[in-house]
Amino acid sequence: MNTLLSRLNGCAVAVAVSVAATVAAADDFRLGLLTPPPHIWTKAAEAFAAELAEESGGAHNVTVFPASQLGNEAEMLQQLQTGALDMAFMTVAEVSNRAPDFGAFYAPYLARDVAHAGRILRSDTAQALLEQLPAKAGVVGTGFGMAGLRQMVSRGEVNSAEDLAGRKIRITPFAPILDFYNAIGAAPTPMPLPDVYDALANGQVDAIDMDAELIWVLKYYEHADTILQSNHMMFPMVGLISGRVWARLSEEDRAMVGDLMARHVDSTIDTYVEAEPGWLDDLKGVGKTYKVIGEDFFADAVEKWNEIWSKKSAALAGLRSVSQETAN
Ligand code: BEZ
């Protein structure tokens, strides 16, 4: 069993628990996530469900609800806290609303490439952050996954960061990402995933912040002129179990459910490390201007972000050390 789960196993989860109220849901877990059915996170959730059913001899069944069927992430996190939802695979961005230390994962250029992002997420320092979640969010974090690194897709030409100034750029609606685009001088426009394609198509936004998989699979490039391979941020995910559900599981079941979930969220890291270069290559051939840019492109925006988040997240310095230690 991984270290965090064994520690949580031995002590009471720091949430108020009404055991009797939740016993009825014992073996039929519901797992929510915002990604659509063909997405890598959804496939990992389904693989987790299948393996748990098999390993538990049918005692534990998980029904996966993709595409925000159970609500947006803020709503799902609330449901996890009350025990109305059992499990979720969720962006770390949402969790950072409750536990700001997690915002440190979004430090621009913390990871030099997607494999490096994976090493940072698998570090003991990153795993230790999960210990905050029972007290801060009423959930148990089993482990980290990810959706690769962030890129940009823009209408019109983009030759410098000044070309992004004042432009409406769709972002995932969370503070660390907002702060980055504000630091650039852009007009960050928070928008959930399902609204992005139409917003770019009809010019409601000028550009989007997105990962390579979705730019390719959902064809976001169709209504854009420029693809910027910026690799500017990692996009981590976390596997969550309601603290109320966790509290009523036996030690044996915690080990089985927690470890299996951790394994499946972690498997998404390998998937992105393997597949991301291919999506980026495919995007080079779609007939748009394709530019590879780095930290220099953003001038002092990265420094500004670091200044803001060194005050907001006590975890930033530790993750920076891990980043240096795991750079090669
Ligand atoms: C996004 O909001 O861009 C996003 C959310 C989940 C997975 C991938 C991308």
Image: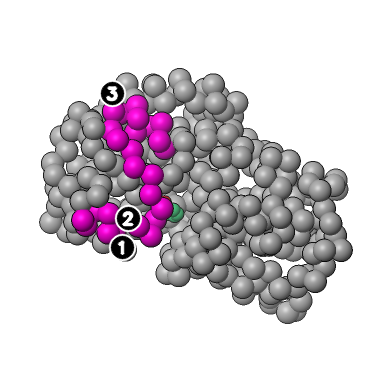
Residue 125 among those drawn in magenta: no
Q: Amino acid type of disc 1?
A: Leu
Q: Are marks 3 and 2 in contact (CB under 8 Å)?
A: no
Q: Quadrant of residue 193?
A: bottom left
Q: Quadrant of residue 92?
A: top right
Q: Amino acid type of disc 2?
A: Val
- Colouring method of the image: one colour
Q: Compare marks 1 and 2 and give the one earlier in the sequence.
A: 2
Q: Which mark is residue 196?
A: 2
> Under tag 2, what secondary structure?
helix
Q: Is residue 50 positioned above or below 39 on the image?
A: below
Q: Is residue 37 positioned above or below 35 on the image?
A: below
Q: Is residue 70 positioned above or below 225 on the image?
A: below
> Under tag 3, what secondary structure?
loop
Which region shows up in magenta? 177-202
Residue 129, image x, y percentages: 64, 38
Residue 77, image x, y percentages: 61, 52
Could you tell me which residue is drawn at 51 percent across and 50 percent down?
91
Q: Compare marks 1 and 3 and give the one earlier in the sequence.
A: 1
- Disc 2 CB within 8 Å of nearest ligand 1 atom: yes
Q: Residues within 10 Å of mark 1 (few under 14, many from 20)?
A: few
> Under tag 1, what secondary structure?
loop
Q: Which mark is residue 299?
A: 3
The alpha-carbon separation of the residues under discs 3 and 2 comes to 27 Å
Q: Is residue 253 positioned above or below 139 on the image?
A: below
43 left or right of 220?
right
Front tag of 3 and 2: 2
The alpha-carbon separation of the residues under discs 1 and 3 comes to 30 Å
Which residue is identified by label 1? 218
Q: Nearer the viewer, residue 48 or 200?
A: 200
Q: Amino acid type of disc 3?
A: Ala
Could you tell me which residue is drawn at 82 percent across and 63 percent down?
21
